[in-house]
Image: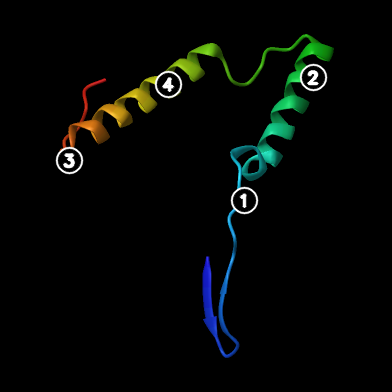
Amino acid sequence: VEMYGGKGISRDKPYYFFVERYAESYAAEIDHFITCVETGSSPAVTASDGRKAMILCEAALASARSGRFEPVKL
């Protein structure tokens, strides 16, 4: 984020590493996992959800590698 004002330009510096950027999300996931173990409940996210995310990632990579702006069939 950049802000322009009377004191000049100020910029937010992004976090350096992936884990730093998503620390809150990781903490929430761990808390949820512990709750599921303690209560015997099912997790909100399943292996199927992870597989679907991976399919989208693979399609995005295929699209980027093709160099064309065309949809990739899933």
Which residue is tagged 2?
34
Residue shown at 30% from the left, 26% from the top: 59
In this view, the residue in front, 70 or 8, is: 8
For marks 3 and 4 on the same chain, the one whose residue lies earlier in the sequence: 4
Q: Report the Cα–Cα distance between label 4 and label 1.
A: 24 Å
Q: Report the Cα–Cα distance between label 4 and label 2.
A: 24 Å
Which residue is tagged 3?
69
Q: Label 2's element?
A: helix
In this view, the residue in front, 8 or 42, is: 8
Q: Specify the amino acid type for callout 3.
A: Phe
- Image quarter for residue 28? top right
Residue shown at 79% from the left, 12% from the top: 37
Which residue is tagged 1?
15
Whole-percent x, y for residue 17 in the image: 61, 42
Label 1 Cα neighbours within 10 Å, binned few <14 / some 14-19 / many ≥20:
few
Q: Are marks 3 and 2 in contact (CB under 8 Å)?
A: no
Q: Label 4's element?
A: helix
Whole-percent x, y for residue 70 in the image: 16, 35
Which residue is tagged 4?
54
Q: Quadrant of the C terminus?
A: top left
In this view, the residue in front, 2 or 32, is: 2
For marks 4 and 1 on the same chain, the one whose residue lies earlier in the sequence: 1
- Image quarter for residue 36? top right
